[in-house]
Each structure stands twice: as structure tokens, then as C-alpha cells.
Image (cartoon, coloured by chain):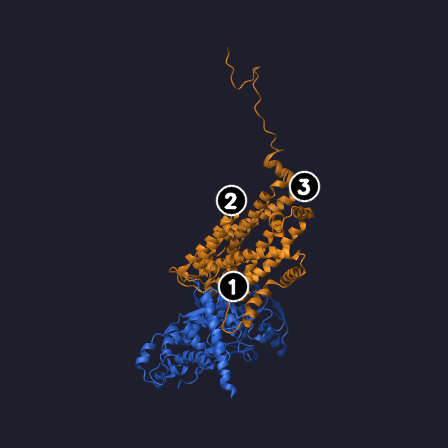
Chain colours: A orange, B blue
Amino acid sequence: MSEISLGTSIAGVPEAAPRQPPALTTGPVAWLRANLFSSWLNTALTLVLGYLIVRYAISFVDWAFVNAIWSVENNQTQACRALKASATPGACWAVVTEKHRFILFGTYPYEEHWRPALVCVLFTALYAVSAMRRFWRKELALIWIATLVVIGILMWGGILGLSYVPQERWGGLPITLILATFGLAFAFPLSILVALGRRSSMPAVRVLCVAYVELIRGVPLISLLFMASVMFPLFLPEGINIDKLLRAQVAITLFAGAYLAEVVRGGLQALPKGQYEAADALGLSYWYKTGFIILPQALRLVIPPLVNTFIGFFKDTSLVLIIGIFDLLTAGKTAVVEPAWQGFGVEVYLAISVIYFCYCFAMSRYSQNLEAELNRHRRR
Amino acid sequence: MSMQPLRRVMSGLKGSLFGALAMTAVGALPAMAQAPAAGAAATLDAIKARGTLVCGVNTGLAGFAQPNSQGVWQGFDVEYCRAIAAAIFNDPNKVRYVPTTAQSRFTALQSGEIDLLARNTTWTLSRDTSLGLDFTGVNFFDGQGFMVKTSTGVKTAKELNGATICVQPGTTTEQNLTDWARANRVQFTPVVIERLEELVGAYAAGRCDAYTTDVSGLAATRSSQPNPAEHTILPDVISKEPLGPLVRHGDQRYADLVRWVHFALVASEELGITQANVAQMAANDTRPEVQRMLGKNGGLGQMLGVSNEWVVNVIKATGNYGEIFARHLQPIGIQRGPNALWTTPGGQQYAMPFR
């Protein structure tokens, strides 16, 4: 018996080594050829744009990292100002280094900053937990209530040995998260009710819901905030003041509710009439029909516009600056009021936009995943 | 006449009813309702009962009110809040600062959300009469001016004929500029930009020849430029902007206190009483006015409803007017000018006599 090596075929002819397809037809090279260098015109465009991109990327890296100043001593910003006026300008990140705690937490007492920091962590954890489908149970509501109570205790204090911090000293990221979270958490159920009410067969309910949506949508958010902060206190009897933040919160909730209601109504309209009729034929009551047949399908349809509105409102909370509440953006603006730091707004705005981007991008990615998961039955 | 006592009882009932309502609200919702501001007639008592002065300040104006990196409010206006708290409580830190915007400031005071508005507000007839508020004095004489690049060689505002001028829209600044230009037959092209930072950027980039706003704002902008010597503030002042603290109309006793704290700050500078020497002067100085001011005799504090050592407490906390000015406004390049004491030429700060 002659030994047959594994590498040879029975006939003893060595098998051809597996061959790669020509390099020019697959892989990145082929992609480049097909998409960027397919004709003379495209080649020229690619080269010009590539040159511009590289050039501006290099100057941005130079500005943001190579030439940048990361910290200065005792508010001595002369080095930053000299750098700004020099031939090789650079970013003065020292303003963010110096002011980051003010930008994040506003005028909250400095030595108590761990409290709002913990609140931001709690909020983010709450979002993360709520996002996971395996936590979508009744207990989630309890988790929300418990977390929000803890957040309230941390922000206000006054018990458990925490010193009391009045609301007007709150600021920065916690304010943005509070306004966005409470605003949307209350606006979403409200919007479902209003959307259902708008399609109700009861005239009084329908007229009320239409009036609410049209009235609130017909005015800018700024004017609602003005009403809440400037006019509303004058109607109250002397000596009674409702907290400024609460007033802004109610205005934002009402405004978001009107917009979300229209989004939800879009989902309700999009459902085929057969779904309603089938549910009726089964003899389900209105609330069973709505809760188990209509809403699950309707809400799934409107995930993209819902998230769109959520992201929009997360950023719209920054409008509270006009009534003197220090949200993240206002705190950033105020940070560069101090004469030593005037003129370094760009660096502060970039830092703030990174924070906004993180939250908004996370929302957007999550909604894409959720959409894919909930619409799995539709994919063939 | 016979209705008078009845009405008083009714208003008393009403007051106590609202007070009780407010107290219930405070008890039930400690977070949502603020401490009762009480009726207009007893602001000082309400402040004492609450234990803090609630002071409305700017959301951020260099030199006047701005939180520092630690979030602690600082500035010229903030020192007035501290001074009044020191006069009432002998503790300048018993102040809650409420940041107010140009739009929300008057409502905040009218509705009782704040006890005092110390927020660079110009004293005008219409504001004094129609808002239900009272100006208690002028702690800063401001006025609109122009800043130009030194290299242009412009020496007075009338040389700005044909110039482009950077100005914020919708403010009295724009109105004043137009009025002044018409009165003086100066032609100009306005460059109107809403955001202050962009406006200053446009001026610095040479998009306009001159930048106009209140002189205090010009000085702050100038000091933040890479090279302040490249910019000149012209001597012409084209408007009057007397700034001062406001209180609600109708509580004269409390308004008196706010007014006299300002006078005490100015008079202390005049008499040479400083943060460093106030204790020693209170003990040793034999000048009669100093003795009355610092509470040795005369009982002036009691007449205002505070302790007789109130001026000592105020000066210990904040220093006199000149020291406050030097601490907050001179570093950003604002000179004393009209805010010098009346004893120096051109100065207008004048305190009424303490007797």
C-alpha cells in the first residue's frame, strides 16, 4: 500500500491551489474603482474632494489637538489669547478644564457636586434598563418610581443628612435630563389619550382634543415658556409661588404632548380598518381593543417619527434659557461670561455638542434596533 | 371712615388666609412652592421669618453678576444682595440668587418670587410708574458709548460720519443710536447682530468701524480682546443709563432699608471706613457722623428695623462702595468716571446725611 498523502487527489494529480479572484474585481480596490474612480470626471472630483477633506481634517486636528492648550493656572488666559491670534491657532480647552464642573452642574453647591453627578448616572442607567426588552415588565414602573424618588432626594436633599439645595441652584446636565425625561414621560401617555380622543365618536371629547392640539401647536414653545414664567405667576394670589422649573416642565410637557399626539394619530390612521372591525367582531371592549390590538400595531408603525420628536424635544429643553433656568447650554454660555474666559465660546459649544450628540445618537441607534426587532415578522 | 377698621380686618383675614394657604402648600409640597413672600406691607418681616433674602440677578454679565467656576455668584450687583443680607442678618451668605432674564425680571419681583431686583436695570419714568415697582437709588451711572480701533485715529463720536456701526437689535441701544445720529446729522450703516458674542466677533474682524453699547459693556469687551490697547472707548456718552436696585411698590419701610444700605456703602467710602478698619473705627473713631453710622449712638439701625450695628456688618461683609467697585468693575477696565464720589470732579455718587 502506497501512502496517499492528504494533499493529493486519488489520481495523484496535485489539486490546484485555491486562487483569489483578480484583485481588481473584488475587495476595497474594486469598490474604489467602481465608486470613486469610474470615469475621468469622478476621478477628478474624488481627488479634489479628498484633498479638501484631508486638508481640513489636518487643520482641525492641528487646531483641536496639536496646538491646543489643555489647562492654564489661575485663570491666566493670556497664553490662550496669544495662541488664538498666532499664525498656528489652537483650541483653548483650558476653558473646558476650568469650567467643566460649572457647565455640567451649574450653580449647584460645589462640594455637593457628587449628588447631581450621581443623578446623571442614575438617569442614564434608567434609560439603559428601560431600553432592554427583558426588563419590560410591571416591575419596570416600580424601578422608575424608585429611581425618580432617589433622584429627587439627591437633588433637593434636606433629609438623610443631605443639605437642602433650593431649585434655583440646580443647573447643567441634570436640568436638561430632568426636563427631557419628565417632559416626555408625561407627554407620551398624554399624547396617546389625546390621539385616541381625536378619533373618538364623542363630540365633546373630540373637540376638546382638537382644541388642545391646535392651540398648543399653534404657538411657539418660547411663547408657552414665557406664559408659564412671566404671566402665570401674576394670576396666582400674592404669596404663592409655583417653582419656576415646575412651570417650565409643565409647559414643555404640554407642548410635547400636542406634537406626540399627532404622531400617534398618524399610526392610528395607518392601521387598516379591518383591524378595528376584526376586534369589534370578537366582541372586545373599547379598551381591550385599543390596548391589545390597535396601539401595539400603531405605535410600532410610528417609532421613527416618535424618536424624531423625542430627539427634537431633548434639544428643545435648552430654550429654558430665556426664563433664566441654567440647563446645559445656558450653563455653557454663562461659563464664558467671565472676562478672563470671554471669546472661548467655540470650545465650550463643541464640548456641549458632544454631550448632546451622545444622548441623541444613542436614542437614534436604539430606535433603529427596536424598529428592526419589532418589525421582524414583516421581513421575508 | 367707619369702613376703615372693617376693611383692615378683612384684608388681615385675607392675608392670613393666603398665609395659611401658602404655609399648607409649603408644608405639603416643600419642593413645589416657595416660601411665602407675604403681603407687600411686610417684606422685611417675611425675609426675617424666612431667614434668607431672595435676590434677582442677571443670568450672567461680566463684573455685575456671574457665577464663578465653583458656581458661586460674584459681581457688583451680587455685592448689593450680600450687603442687604448682612444688614438684616449679619450674614452676607443668607441670600438665594434667582437668575432673571431681561423679560422675566419684573414679573419675578411683582409676583413676590424675589425680594430685590439687583440687575443692571435702567431707571426710567415709565418703569417707575407703570410696573408697580420702586427704584431705590442709583448704584451705577452708565451710558451708551462707542468703541473703535485705535488705529483708525477717531477721537470723538461725531467723526463717525459714514461709518458702519455694530449694534444689538431690539434694544434701547439701537434706538439711542438712531436718535443720536439724527440729532447730530451723522450718517451711518448699522450692522445688526443679535448674539453678543457674534457681534463682538464681527467688530473684532473689522466688519464694522465702531461698536456701540453701554460703556460698562464696552469696557468688559475691550478687556477681553487679545490686545486691549488696540481699542479705544470714545469719550462721548450718548444716553443716560442710571442703574439701581428695585423693590416692590408699597412697602416703604423695606425700600428705605435698601436705599440706606446703598447710602451707607457710599458714605463709608467718603468717611474712609473700609473692610479692614471698620471694627477699629467703630471702637475708636470720635467723629459724630461715624459714631452714628456705626451704631455707637443715635439708634439709626432701629429706625430702619435692623440692628444698630448694621453698617459695621455691611462693611465687614462687602467693604465700602469704592472697594466693591475696585474688586469687580476696575479689573474689567471700568473707570470710576461718573461713579466717583461727589467730592471728586465729575463724580456723582452722593450719600444723604446719616443723622
Instruction: Where is residue B305? Give x, y as percent.
Output: 40, 80
Q: Residue furthest top?
A: A1
Q: Residues within 10 Å of mark 2 (few under 14, many from 20)?
A: few
Look at mark 3 in the image and give the residue it sits on. Answer: A40
Viewer-nearest residue: B41 or A312: B41
Using residue B179 as the reference point, say whether residue A67 is left or right of it.
left
Question: Looking at the picture, how far across and down is residue A183, in whole percent?
Answer: 55, 58
Identify the residue at image location x=39%, y=62%.
A163
Mark 1 packing: few (<14 Cα in 10 Å), some, or many (20+)?
A: some
Gap in Å between the C-alphas at discs 2 and 1?
33 Å
Circle 1: residue type? Leu
Host chain of mark 2: A
Residue A33 % position (x, y) = 63, 38
Q: Chain for mark 3?
A: A
Q: x and y percent of residue B228 in the render? A: 49, 67
Q: Secondary structure at mark 2?
A: helix
Which amino acid type corresponds to the residue marked 3 in the rendered image? Trp
Q: Quadrant of the C terminus of chain B?
A: bottom left
Instruction: Decide which of B322, B163 is in the foreground and name it.
Output: B322
- Circle number at residue A246: 1
Image marks 2 and 1: residues in contact by CB distance under 8 Å: no
Residues flagged by tags 3 and 2 on a common chain? yes
Closer mark to the observer between disc 2 and disc 1: 2
Residue B82 vs residue A131, the one in the foreground: A131
Q: Amino acid at mark 2?
A: Arg
Measured in 3D between alpha carbons, the distance from the residue under mark 1 to the one under mark 3, in whole angstroms, is 62 Å
Residue behind mark 2: A134
